Amino acid sequence: MRLSELQNKRIINVHDGSYIGEIIDVNINTSGHIESLVVEKSKFLISRFTTKDEILIKWNNIEKIGEDVILTSI
């Protein structure tokens, strides 16, 4: 699977079905493996009290990669 294919998928929380956001970048370790996904928060998750609008989702928290969505247990 290519990064461009991953970027087209929505990130969903497997516990409550909420929409988390979309992939804007990935972190890759020195061996070339994906360590985490950098996800732009959904506008619904952005708090007035924080300026951080990105979430890091560790690769081992990915439960399932489907055709349209990525399920995660963050």
Image (cartoon, grey):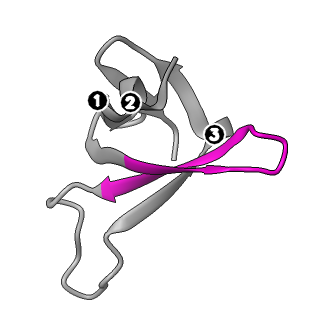
**Magenta stretch: residue 44 in it?**
no
Q: In which quarter of the image is residue 62?
A: top right
Q: Do the residues labelled 1 and 2 touch (CB within 8 Å)?
A: yes
Q: Nearer the viewer, residue 62 or 23?
A: 23
Residue at x 38% of width, y 65% of height: 54
At label 3, which amino acid type do we have?
A: Trp
Q: In which quarter of the image is residue 17?
A: top left
Residue at x 63% of width, y 39% of height: 59
Q: Which mark is residue 4?
A: 2
Which label's residue is closer to the chain start, 2 or 3? 2
Neighbourhood count class around disc 1 (C-alpha, 10 Å): few under 14, some 14–19, many 20 upward? some
Q: Nearer the viewer, mark 2 or mark 3?
A: 2
Q: Nearer the viewer, mark 1 or mark 2?
A: 2
**Magenta stretch: residue 33 in it?**
yes
Q: Mark 1 points at which residue?
A: 8
Neighbourhood count class around disc 3 (C-alpha, 10 Å): few under 14, some 14–19, many 20 upward? some
At label 2, which amino acid type do we have?
A: Ser
Secondary structure under the numbered disc 3 in the rendered image? helix
Question: What span is colored magenta in the figure?
Answer: 24-40
Q: Name the residue under label 3.
A: 59
At label 1, which amino acid type do we have?
A: Asn
Mark 1 and mark 2: Cα distance apart in space:
7 Å
Q: Nearer the viewer, residue 20 or 7?
A: 7
Horizontal and vertical percent for residue 25? 45, 51
Secondary structure under the numbered disc 1 in the rendered image? loop
Q: Quadrant of residue 48?
A: bottom left
Mark 2 and mark 3: Cα distance apart in space:
17 Å
